[in-house]
Image: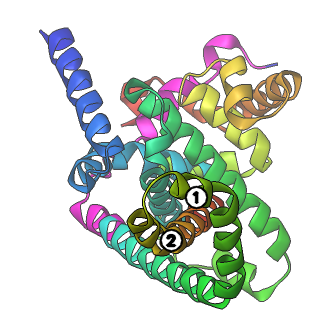
């Protein structure tokens, strides 16, 4: 058995082995890596947004149906209470609202799934 | 008053961390500047290879930059960064285990690391005798001064396993580094 006094002080040895590794080169390598990472993720975001809007474009007929449905049950009764002028404004606006809402929901879902 | 300096240094770091949490890249670069020596030293003890350690340290900072907005309290940055180091190290160990026996792993091991002599070399050689898990526990306990409970929380290992790794690892290190215990510090230099 080793005598307690003969045992090395591990804490002391670890601190003695500690080196000063401050180096600006390392800092710039980390910065470069972060910048590359940012560029890569920006590219992915742009790609995903493009794909999402292409999908929306493909889904447009179904969205038209959805907006018609909304029109029939939600907007039309409201509009009928007011003037025909309001109908002319609200009807096209309705399609835009549906498209934007769907786009936002898909984008948010993709963002949460891909980027945490 | 060194205490006052330490206190203001700490407040300054909390301020820098808060700025980095808000997405300020310049502030994050300052954090890298301040913490690089600690991170690189710890990674060197974990893997015993200076080139690999620097690569892992870069990965740690990259992960830190990506996730710093998830940090809840700015004054816990050190502990959070340490946990990231341990996670990055374990991820590397798992990858290394998958690659074991393949050419890629053989290449990594034969990388031309600078020759280090003296205590650093002896300490790294002694640490290399321990398993990856045992080495991690021993380093966190002796170098970072963490309690067994803190080591268990950081590594995700059961407390009993951590205690056993530390006990056995400490014995092995004391045996392998017994020359450093017999001679007083001053005579060694």
> Quick one: SS at disc 2?
helix
Measuring 66% from the left and 61% from the top, which residue is drawn there?
A113
Q: Is residue B98 magenta?
A: no
Label 2: chain letter: A
Q: Is residue A50 above or below residue B24?
A: below
Query: Which stretch is magenta?
Result: A2-30
- How packed mark 1 is, by other alpha carbons closer than 10 Å (few <14, some 14-19, many 20 or more), is some
Q: Position of residue B43 (x, y in %)?
A: 53, 51
Relative depth, front residue between B15 and B48 = B15
**Does B136 sit left or right of B77 as displayed?**
right
Q: Is residue A25 magenta?
A: yes
Q: Is residue A85 above or below residue B131?
A: below
| Marking on residue B126 | none
The answer to whether marks 2 and 1 mark residues whose Cβ atoms lie closer than 8 Å is yes
- How packed mark 2 is, by other alpha carbons closer than 10 Å (few <14, some 14-19, many 20 or more), is some
Q: Examine the rendering and report whether any part of residue B65 can be seen.
A: yes
Relative depth, front residue between B175 and B21 = B21
Q: Is residue B56 above or below residue A37?
A: above
Q: How is the image coloured?
A: rainbow
Label 1: chain letter: A
Measuring 59% from the left and 22% from the top, which residue is drawn there?
B146
Image quadrant in which the N terminus of chain B is located: top left
Image quadrant in which the C terminus of chain B is located: top left
Q: CA distance from mark 2 to mark 1?
A: 8 Å
Q: Which residue is mark 2?
A: A91
Q: Which residue is mark 1?
A: A75
Question: Chief secondary structure of the magenta span?
Answer: helix
């Amino acid at each position: 058995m080793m005598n307690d006094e003969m045992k090395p002080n591990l804490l002391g040895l670890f601190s003695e082995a500690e080196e000063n590794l401050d180096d600006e080169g390392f800092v710039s390598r980390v910065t470069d890596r972060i910048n590359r990472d940012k560029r890569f993720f920006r590219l992915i975001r742009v790609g995903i947004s493009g794909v999402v809007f292409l999908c929306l474009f493909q889904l447009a007929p179904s969205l038209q149906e959805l907006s018609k449905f909304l029109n029939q049950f939600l907007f039309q009764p409201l509009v009928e209470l007011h003037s025909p002028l309001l109908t002319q404004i609200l009807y096209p606006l309705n399609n835009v609202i549906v498209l934007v809402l769907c786009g936002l929901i898909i984008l948010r879902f993709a963002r949460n799934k891909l980027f945490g | 008053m060194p205490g006052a300096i330490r206190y203001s240094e700490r407040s300054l770091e909390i301020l820098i961390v808060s700025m980095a949490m808000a997405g300020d890249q310049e502030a994050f670069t300052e954090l890298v500047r301040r913490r690089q020596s600690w991170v690189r030293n710890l990674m060197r003890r974990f893997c015993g290879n200076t080139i690999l350690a620097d690569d892992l340290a870069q990965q740690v900072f990259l992960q830190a930059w990506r996730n710093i907005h998830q940090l809840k309290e700015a004054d816990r940055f050190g502990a959070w960064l340490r946990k990231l180091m341990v996670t990055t190290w374990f991820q590397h160990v798992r990858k290394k285990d998958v690659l074991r026996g393949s050419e890629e792993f053989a290449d990594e091991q034969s990388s031309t690391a600078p020759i280090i002599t003296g205590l650093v070399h002896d300490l790294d050689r002694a640490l290399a005798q321990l398993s990856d898990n045992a080495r991690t526990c021993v380093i966190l306990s002796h170098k970072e001064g963490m309690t067994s409970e803190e080591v268990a929380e950081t590594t995700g290992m059961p407390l009993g396993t951590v205690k056993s790794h530390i006990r056995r690892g400490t014995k092995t290190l004391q045996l392998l580094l017994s020359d450093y215990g017999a001679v007083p510090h001053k005579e060694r230099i």
